[in-house]
Image (cartoon, rainbow, N blue to C red):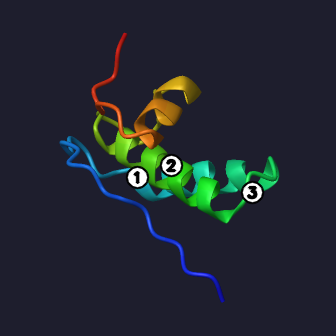
Amino acid sequence: MESHSVLQQDTEIFDRVGGGDSFASGFICGLLEGRGLDWALRCGVAHGALAMSTPGDTSMVSRAEVERHMKGKNARISR
């Protein structure tokens, strides 16, 4: 069985509510798009982390912000 891991970045956590759901949605998105397990895992981790950096249980980040975070860019959200 292949092992997968994701390099972690420091991300300031504001509100943990919704982080798991956001991880799941990012991960499932990658699987449904056929991007492979590694991409799906990185997408889930990035989306979950970004969701926890904003208040509330609904992710307000864009796909571009998730993909930027996946590339190791600053986690601050540009609005």
- What residue did someone put label 1 on? 19
What residue is at 32 percent from the left and 44 percent from the top? 52
Percent coordinates x, y for residue 13 in the rendering: 21, 45
Percent coordinates x, y for residue 6 in the rendering: 42, 62
Circle nearer the N terminus (1, 3) = 1
So how many labels did they put on this image? 3
Circle nearer the N terminus (3, 2) = 2
Please rate how many residues cluster around mark 1, counting C-alpha atoms within 10 Å: few if below 14, some from 14 to 19, many from 20: many
Q: Nearer the viewer, residue 24 or 42?
A: 42
Tag shown at residue 41: none
Residues at circles 1 and 2 in contact by the CB criterion of under 8 Å: yes
Establish if 16 lies above or below 71.
below
Question: In the rendered view of the protein, which quadrant contains the C terminus?
Answer: top left
Q: Nearer the viewer, residue 50 or 3?
A: 3
Tell me the CA gap for discs 1 and 3. Answer: 18 Å
Question: In the rendered view of the protein, which quadrant contains the N terminus?
Answer: bottom right
Kind of residue at badge 3: Leu
Tag shown at residue 31: 3
Q: Secondary structure at mark 3?
A: helix
- What residue did someone put label 2 on? 22
Please rate how many residues cluster around mark 2, counting C-alpha atoms within 10 Å: few if below 14, some from 14 to 19, many from 20: many
Percent coordinates x, y for residue 54 in the rendering: 30, 33
Kind of residue at badge 2: Ser
Please rate how many residues cluster around mark 3, counting C-alpha atoms within 10 Å: few if below 14, some from 14 to 19, many from 20: some
